[in-house]
């Protein structure tokens, strides 16, 4: 398989508090990796370091064969490594269509007509063709998140980072967002998915990574992680979140 991302000894600290400690991880083209773990384990910080919303304290990142350096164009990196956030981050004064065309026009210099065509195709893809002219205030949480995913896809990223994209949604809206992500996985989109949805991780991911205390404790196929976990900390986590047993 072709490697698209390699992380070596990535560390991150806020003052004396180490959030990430020596993370090593590789991602292959077309692979969907679910990152699970308790709150505060470093999952979201890892994604933010990859997208350079946070600056790592140490370590290397090689993306599409090129190592990230101080000279790397961060905007170009973010265009190729798109990120979808848990709180949507849509422009409230722009319609769904307006949100999606903004970056392709201003970052990649796509013509407005081309951007509009691409945006309408993407809105159809996420099931919102009839909401193109709606403002975020007129959309449900699930619809907002689907617009946010379409906005990210408009940049035609090579890698998609999804940071707990269902955690801010009402329970009945979670399924519509997960259906979009499931469809992306079937189509071969390369994704790193931070999620608390264990059944979704089991069904969709090619590989599951369990983090705790800023380190990768265990990783493997969904069957290995959920049915044959080796690490006692992972077993206790799964008992707590799947079986609802207290830790």
Image (tube, helix red, strand yellow):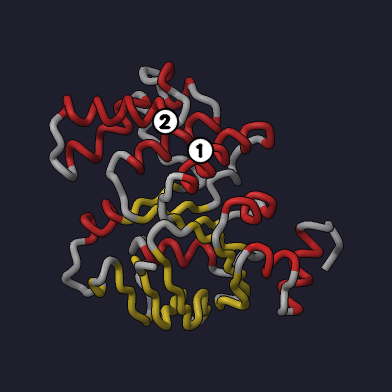
Q: CA distance from mark 2 to mark 1?
A: 8 Å
Contact flag, marks 2 and 1 (Cβ < 8 Å): yes
The image shows residue 173, relative to residue 161, as above or below, that is: above
Quadrant in the picture for the N terminus: bottom left
Asked whether the viewer can see residue 55, the reply is yes
The residue sitting at 60% across, 38% down in the picture is 169
Q: Secondary structure at mark 1?
A: helix
Q: Nearer the viewer, residue 11 or 220?
A: 220
Q: Which residue is mark 1?
A: 180
Mark number, residue 105: none
Around disc 1, counting alpha carbons within 10 Å, would you say few (fewer than 14), some (14 to 19), or many (20 or more)?
some
Asked whether the viewer can see residue 94, the reply is no
The residue sitting at 46% across, 59% down in the picture is 31
Q: Nearer the viewer, residue 10 or 54?
A: 10
Q: Quadrant of residue 117?
A: top left
Q: Nearer the viewer, residue 246 or 4?
A: 4
Q: Secondary structure at mark 2?
A: helix
Residue 217 x/y as whole percent: 62, 78
Residue 118 x/y as whole percent: 27, 31
The residue sitting at 39% across, 51% down in the picture is 83
Q: Quadrant of residue 53?
A: bottom left
The image shows residue 60, relative to residue 48, as above or below, that is: below
- Extreme front residue here? 1
Q: Which residue is mark 2?
A: 125
Residue 226 x/y as whole percent: 72, 64
Around disc 2, counting alpha carbons within 10 Å, would you say few (fewer than 14), some (14 to 19), or many (20 or more)?
some
Mark toward the start of the polypeptide (2 vs 1): 2
Q: Quadrant of residue 93?
A: top left
Image side of residue 68 versus residue 71, left or right: right
How many marks the image carries: the answer is: 2
Quadrant in the picture for the C terminus: bottom right
């Amino acid at each position: 398989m072709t490697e698209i991302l390699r992380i070596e000894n990535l560390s991150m600290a806020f003052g004396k508090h180490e959030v990430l400690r020596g993370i090593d991880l590789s991602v292959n083209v077309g692979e969907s990796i679910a990152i699970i773990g308790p709150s505060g384990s470093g999952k979201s910080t890892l994604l933010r370091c990859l997208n350079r919303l946070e600056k790592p304290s140490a370590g290397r990142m090689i993306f599409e064969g090129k190592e990230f350096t101080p000279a790397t164009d961060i905007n170009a990196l973010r265009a190729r490594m798109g990120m979808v956030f848990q709180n949507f981050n849509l422009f409230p004064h722009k319609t769904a269509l307006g949100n999606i065309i903004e970056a392709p026009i201003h970052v990649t210099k796509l013509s407005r007509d081309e951007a509009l065509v691409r945006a309408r195709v993407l809105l159809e893809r996420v099931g919102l063709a009839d909401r193109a002219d709606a403002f975020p205030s007129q959309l449900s949480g699930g619809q907002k998140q689907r617009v946010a995913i379409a906005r990210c896809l408009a940049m035609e990223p090579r890698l998609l980072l999804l940071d707990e994209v269902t955690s801010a949604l009402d329970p009945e809206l979670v399924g519509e967002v997960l259906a979009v992500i499931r469809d992306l996985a079937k189509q071969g989109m390369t994704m790193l998915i931070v999620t608390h949805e264990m059944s979704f991780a089991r069904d969709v991911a090619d590989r599951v990574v369990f983090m705790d205390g800023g380190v990768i404790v265990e990783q493997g196929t969904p069957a290995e992680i959920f049915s044959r976990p080796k690490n006692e900390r992972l077993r206790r986590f799964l008992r707590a979140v799947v079986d609802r047993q207290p830790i």
